[in-house]
Each structure stands twice: as C-alpha cells, then as structure tokens.
Image (cartoon, rainbow, N blue to C red):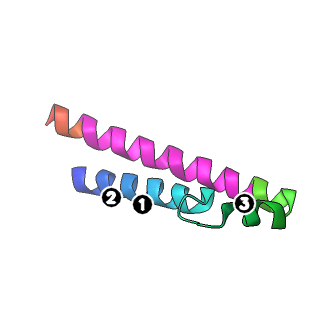
Amino acid sequence: MITFFLVLGIIGVALSAVFLGVTSSSSRGDYYSETNAHHNFRTKVALYAGAIGIIGFGAAGLLYYVF
C-alpha cells in the first residue's frame, strides 16, 4: 500500500512538472505563443496533479510512520 501511494506521488509531481513546463528549455517562446485558455488549462492540470502527488507522498509517509 505504501508503494502505491509513493508511485502515485511520483507520477503526480512528475506530471505537474511537465505541465508547468519545468522540463522545457524554450519556456519563454512557449509562453508568448500559447493562448490564455491554453495557459490556464495547463496551469489547472498542473495544480491538480501536484496536489494529488503531494497527497500521495503524505499518505505514503503517514502509512510508513504508522506501520
């Protein structure tokens, strides 16, 4: 069960990083070429994925501490 939440946390944080553009080397060009709706969509997906990732890491840590 700990492994599940740990993997969920890793996937959530990695997906959040990809949608925020952390891995992109041309973030300045991407920012000016995308529409406002596209930027808002990417930010919303990144926030939700990051929240799921943090909750997954928290649950894994709590389960590890308790058991």
Q: Could you say where residue 12 lies in the image, as x and y percent from the top left?
A: 46, 55
Is 34 in front, or is 59?
34
* In this view, 59 is above or below 26: above
Going 48% across and 48% down the picture, which residue do you hit?
52
* Residue 16 horizontal side relative to residue 8, left or right: right
Query: What residue does disc 1 label?
Result: 11
State the SS at label 3. Answer: helix
Magenta segment: does it hold 38? no
For the residues bearing labels 2 and 1, Cβ distance under 8 angstroms: yes
Give whichever of discs 3 and 1 has the lower sequence position: 1
Crowd band around label 1 with a 10 angstrom C-alpha radius: few (<14), some (14–19), many (20+): some
Residue 28 or residue 2, whichever sits in front: 28
Residue that numbered label 3 is attached to: 28
Determine contact: label 2, label 3, CB under 8 Å: no
Q: Residue at x 42, y 60 (%)?
A: 11
Can residue 34 be seen in this snapshot?
Answer: no
From the viewer's perspective, is 59 left or right of 39? left
At a point 44% along the width and 49% down the height, the residue shown is: 53
Residue 7: mark in rendering: 2
Residue type at tag 1:
Ile
Is residue 53 magenta-colored? yes
Label 2 crowd (10 A; few <14 / some 14-19 / many >=20)? some
Location of residue 26 (image quadrant): bottom right
Q: Which residues are magenta?
A: 41-62
Mark 2 or 3, nearer chain start: 2
Percent x, y for residue 38? 79, 62
How far across and down, in percent of the image, does residue 28 sit? 72, 60
